[in-house]
Image (tube, rainbow, N blue to C red):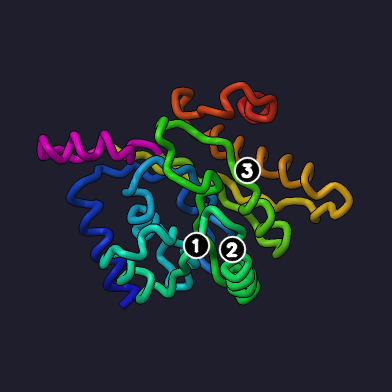
Amino acid sequence: MKKLIRLGARFVIFLIADVTAIGIENLPKHGSYIAASNHLGRLDAILTLTLINRDDLILMIAEKYQKSTLWRFIVKYLDALWLNRFDADFHTMRVVVKRLRQGQFLVIAPEGTRSPQETLLEGKHGTAFLAAKTGVPIVPIALYGTEDRVVKRNLRHLKRSKVVVQAGERFTLPPLDHQDRDQYLQTQTDEIMCRIAAMLPTQYQGFYTDHPRLRELAQ
């Protein structure tokens, strides 16, 4: 069923998007990792399914979509997890940690939601926490052209949207600093987000446009 869903996703993407994929060789074919991506539109999740040819995906879907027949189908057959984005969802996090330690991989948007401004929002600490807790590497992913507004406009004109997806080099966070946990998570979240921002055109860098770490990465 997972292969059929992926084939369906590829067909949908073929119909509505002209995708340029860069650095896909950076996505491991085996073993645990976290794919951390920016989030511009509803197309993002479907696009991810088409690029990563593995069945052991950990996917979290916001609880607000529980009334959607399509998303309930996806959650059921992809063994995805419902996530409460507004409260500390410790149960879901424990399941994710367990699956990562078993060798699966996670696709996550550190921003926690689609960006209404169509630029990077400030990242939340969850991705850094999971990476530090499990010790698995992170692969930053930058994508653009998937904005809902742009995709809908192009569909009205029977035009495919030009989408760019770039996967950067994997990296691993230093061990969790329990003495100054909040500062550690903030620093590492900035690292993740700036690595994503470094692969985006300037107009998409948003909250991280003037971040010192982004300037370092750009040199």
Q: Is residue 97 left or right of residue 86?
A: right
Q: What distance separates the C-alpha of mark 3 from that of mark 1?
A: 21 Å
Residue 88 drawn at (x, y percent): 62, 59
Q: Is residue 12 left or right of residue 94?
A: left
Q: How many marks?
A: 3
> At label 2, which amino acid type do we have?
Asp
Q: What distance separates the C-alpha of mark 3 from that of mark 2?
A: 22 Å
State whether residue 54 is above or below residue 203: below
Q: Tell me the residue that label 3 is attached to.
A: 192
Q: Residue at 34% across / 42% down in the picture?
A: 20
- State which tag comes first along the sequence, 3 or 2: 2
Q: Tell me the residue that label 2 is attached to.
A: 89
Q: Residue at 36% across / 60% down in the picture?
A: 65
Residues at discs 3 and 1 in contact (Cβ within 8 Å): no
Residues at discs 2 and 1 in contact (Cβ within 8 Å): yes
Which disc number belongs to residue 83? 1
**Callout 2 crowding tier (Cα within 10 Å): few <14, some 14–19, many ≥20:** few
Residue 102 drawn at (x, y percent): 61, 76
> At label 1, which amino acid type do we have?
Leu
User: In terms of secondary structure, where does tag 2 sit?
Assistant: loop
User: In terms of secondary structure, where does tag 1 sit?
Assistant: strand
Q: In front here: 54 or 149?
A: 149
**Callout 3 crowding tier (Cα within 10 Å): few <14, some 14–19, many ≥20:** many
> At label 3, which amino acid type do we have?
Ile
**Front of the two marks 3 and 2:** 2
**What stretch of residues is rendered in magenta?**
144-161
Q: Is residue 38 left or right of residue 184?
A: left
Quarter location, residue 96:
bottom right
**Callout 1 crowding tier (Cα within 10 Å): few <14, some 14–19, many ≥20:** many
Residue 66 drawn at (x, y percent): 36, 65
Q: Residue at 27% across / 60% down in the picture?
A: 9
